[in-house]
Image: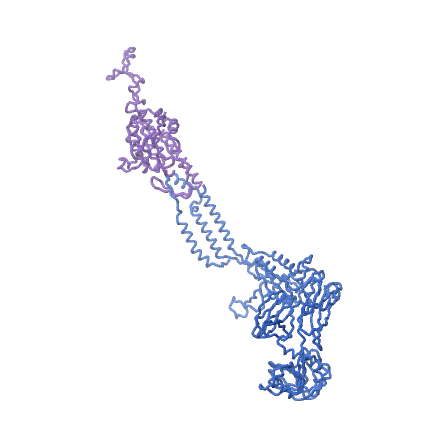
Amino acid sequence: MTFATPLIAGLIAAIAVPTLVILYFLKLRRSPLEVSTTLLWKKSIQDIQANAPFQRLRKNILLLLQLLVLALLIVALAQPRSDQGSVGGQRIVLMLDRSASMSSTDGDDSGTQSRLEAAKQRAIEVVESLEEPGVLKREGSADQAMVVAFDAAAEIIQPFTTDKRQLIDAINSVQPTDAPTSIAEAYRLAQAQRPKRRFTDDAGGTLPAGQTFELEGLVGGPGYTFHLFSDGRIPDSDVFKADAESEDAPPTFEYHAVGSPDSHNVGITALRAERAFDDPRRLSVFVGLQGTEPAPRNVDVELLISGRIVSVRTVTIPAAEPAQPGAPPTPATGGVVFELDEPNGVQVTARLPGIGGTAGNALDTDDEGILIVPPAKRSAVALVTTGSLFLQGALPGLPLSRFDVLSPGEYEAQRVSGALNKYDVVVLDRYLPEPNEAGSRLDPGRYLIFGAVPPPPIGVESGPVGGASAIINWRRNHPVLRELTLDGLVIGRARPMVIPDGSGAVALADSPEGPAIVEVSEGTVRAIVASFDLGETNWPFQIGFVVYLGSAIEYLSGATADAGGTGDRQIEPGGVLADRVPKDARDLRVMLPGGGSLELVPSLDGRVVYGPVRDEGVYRLEWAGTPGATDLVDGVKVSRFFAANLLDPQESDITPADTLGLADRTVRARREESSGVLELWPYLVLAGLAIMLFEWWIYNKRVSL
Amino acid sequence: MRKSANPTRPTTIDELIDPALIARLSQLDLSSNKIFAGKLKGERRSKKRGESVEFADHRPYALGDDLRHIDWNVFGRLDRLFMKLFLEEEDLSLHIVLDASASGDCGEPNKFFYMQQTAMALAYIGLVNLNRVAVTALGTRDTAISPQGDQGIAGTIRDLRGRRRIQDVARFLCSLGPEGTTDFGRAAKRIAMSRRGKGIMVVLSDFFMKEGYETGLRMLSGRGYDVFALQVLAPQEVEPDVAGDLRLIDIEDLDHAEVTVSSPLLKKYKQNLAAYCEDLRTFCARREITALTVQTDTPVDILLLDYMRKRGVLR
């Protein structure tokens, strides 16, 4: 038995016990009464005292009882507790899936309750069944529970508590979102609550005896019991496996599946818009659909441009069939492509009209998708050449807004007058400009260079001119080289380059002698350099050459636009809205799709972040100041649009999973680790109360008439 | 039991004895089973042969006898001289001993006033019937007030005869107040030593004497008095009306007892009181003392006309 607060109790005992004794020795103030004689009274008192058993004790029994009560209370104040070393209550983590699929309205048979509502009810039932803490119960014997809500991200709604009211309130406060599902963060969040495992160093002897140390990432304590309330559409449920295998007290899982396996859904799982490579005015919008019904189904797909219906197509979604007999059916997919002539930046909406709330569509969130399509971008290109048949022939075929052929002299003249700003990309053919004041041959700008090597400081060193060569390796994932092959390229006279140490240059294609194509990126200068002369290769006769020109000019000019200007304006619910705004932007606000707005403060370099984005819809950044290239200007207000769409096949496939791919359930051995501490003070207080009642009874018996 | 809040302190005979009671008392007389020798001619038959009309005996004439009492009829028949003896009628001595200590100043009605009333009524009866009446008050007093105050006698008045002395008795009784302690033994000794003749003695007291009543009563009963002990108790002494934590102060000697009144205590008190009274009665019965316990809420006329008649004190 140990005492929690012996000092306080000792202090109070030192004050209270003498006080009680002194009070007792102070005589009772009796009211005087004159009587004819005290003869008979004295005799009576003597008689009573002589007849009563334990008369001496009885004289002081009230004092003794009071001292006993006081002693009990003081010991109670010291908070004695006995370490019984037994197991405490369970630690339960209630994980509520609030992702988009949980909004499906098949939580009950009538189809009015969402899955989240059903999950909340089940969670509350679990909470109700927890063992409650009591004054007389062993400390820690009560079950504790934590509420974690998760979609793509996780949030602790209620940390561990034994208070059922708080838990139920926390469960009820969970709101559905339109985000996809990821349980990993929720799991790690819950595991992070566990105490660190402590080790005693008994072998190394570097630590004093009795001292413990912790290792990062190793948790101790009994494993949690996870109650997972979900429809099982969790792509990353294998996160538990590693823990379950490595821990000596692995967590246990209980999976509460919500939703009806008979409910079906049709949803948009993909939405993309692309401008045609050769004609940026042409906009293709691809809508991908997914259905879970076991029968083919026709679905109308509407396409809206800035809120106006421009096209309706009927799509047939084939029947969903299981991949193997007995397995759950794999959702069937379908798709449709809309071709539009739309050079402007628009908001494209694809939706499935007329199926909201019907039997075959349990989830409404995925019936609509929005795209923000930037306006068609065309570049202005200047070709500086002394005469190149290939380039002069190929470049005009590209969708350019402006194309000028300049001689080196004209180029230098325009360079002095500053008229070069109107070009997005300058193509240098076997020519390098004169060095400027900084000693660099390249002014700030974008360059596509053939047959010349810009020397350092901005550039690479050129190696010796060699013989015939070929490209043996290239970066296939680079935007410029992604869509072409360099296999057939034969170089008559290789001029390999040498990339100096510490240079920002990256080799895009290598010949056996050295890099043949490099990307130079130094501050405001960006250049793609092909060191060989086009006339000495067979490249111009290959389709890949035109593709290379187009990709490179698109890549370079795209990089010239303001930061993020043509970036993807798509956000996934559960992710964050991150973008850059011009540095002079003021009064920056984000307008939320549900109405309402939020003020944002951009960082010094103009970066803004809002998140996590929970609901799908159109988010609008609004500010006063300089607009970006694709931004909408309305008076002083500049607007930039972002679209958040679910577009997640996992979420649209609402068929609840019967089982989760969890690790093999190992039988958990309960470790006698938690200290079952029994608080003794309530018993002492109760005993004190009983003695006080007994004392009252004795007193009453003595004075009763 | 507790000290009277407003005790009656009589100042005239009318306050002491109700005129209506006087009318009823006139028919009463003192009686005693014993026949005492009197002092003066009275209405009481005496042991002595005397000059009443009632014939008692004959005796032979002796020289010097009064010739008037020779029974001449017997002389004529027998020719011998015989004296006619007659019963003597003498007065009866009534000695009223009254406890005038402070303990009498208790109860509702006041015990001392009750004793005063009873003493007055008894004295009245005695005086009206030509008896010799003496009244002695017990209680220690300063010797300046009472010559025998240090011996436990607060005052005494004696040798009273005839109706005219009624006022004297009343005045004496009115002059008394309940104060001081009792010293019953010494006082009784004093009374016994100074007695005049034999007769009836009525002792009025509560008999709550710490030193004990036995010595005193023995003294009084041993000298030829027909002693009548009247124990006067207040109703509050028989049924105490107290409660709580009390410091009981003895009104006489200021002794105190601390009690917490409880039902066992009260029960014990009543038992003790009953036993005390029973002891008194037993003691008295052994010494031919008639004992009577009376509560002060009993009217005086009932006490006299009923209780005392039944016990043969009055007739």
Farthest residue in the left direction?
Answer: B64
Closer to the camera, B60 or A671? A671
Q: Position of residue A686 (x, y in %)?
A: 51, 51
Looking at the image, can residue B33 be seen? Answer: no
Q: Is residue A580 left or right of residue B311?
A: right
Q: Is residue A104 left or right of residue A67?
A: right
Closer to the camera, B75 or A173? A173
Q: How is the image coloured?
A: by chain
Question: Which chain is displayed in blue in the rendered image?
Answer: A
Q: Quadrant of residue B303?
A: top left
Closer to the camera, A545 or A4? A545
Q: Quadrant of residue A289?
A: bottom right
Q: Quadrant of residue B174?
A: top left
Q: Position of residue B30 (x, y in %)?
A: 34, 25
Q: Colour of chain B?
A: purple
Give the vertical position of A600 relative to B244 (above or below).
below
Give the vertical position of A690 relative to B91 (above or below).
below
At x 35%, y 42%, the residue is: B255
